[in-house]
Amino acid sequence: PIVFCLAGLLAGMFGIGGGIVIVPLLLTIGTHPAVASSTSSAMVLITSLVSSSVYFVFGLILYDYAVAGFVIAFFSSLVGQMLMGRLRQARSASGRTFERNSYLAFVIGGVVLISALLMTIQYIFSIVEGPDDDRGSLCDGLSFS
């Protein structure tokens, strides 16, 4: 539990998804890939709800983008769920059916790898472009007097 608390703390501090840290840890300690993926999804749900509520409170939600993102994510996850359900089905030499969990582990590893590469590329671009002070922050409009 201490390792996972530390992983959650580091993920929050550096702005990376907890799944990038926690899923490999869960797989390393021998957790079933479906359980590791489900645990990560539950964490993403909680984090997304908290983040969305903060953006809602500060009036920062762009509703047209939010609806488009929801629709794309919903249908993409539906297609991904059906595709993985078919890919994981396998037959043994004796004719018995079973589920291959290796595909799920490879997909999780691929997503982590792509995320790491994209974060690295984004960081390199931010270094090359220099500091961007025009972006502002969430707390710019607040005054504590």
Image (tube, rainbow, N blue to C red):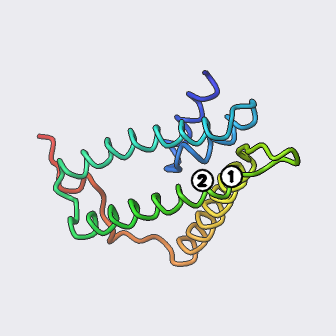
Q: Residue furthest top?
A: 1
**Residue type (three-letter) at the residue carrying disc 2:** Gly
Residue displayed at 60% across by 53% down: 85
Which quadrant, please, contains the N terminus?
Answer: top right
| Residue underneath mark 1 | 88
Using the image, tell me which numbered label, if any, was put on residue 85.
2
Q: Quadrant of residue 125?
A: bottom right
x%, y% of residue 36? 61, 38
- Tag 1 and tag 2, C-beta contact below 8 Å: yes
Which quadrant, please, contains the C terminus?
Answer: top left
Nearest the eye: 120 or 131: 120
Residue displayed at 57% across by 45% down: 19
Secondary structure, mark 1, is helix
Alpha carbons under labels 1 and 2: distance apart: 6 Å
**Residue type (three-letter) at the residue carrying disc 1:** Arg
Nearest the eye: 79 or 139: 79
Secondary structure, mark 2, is helix
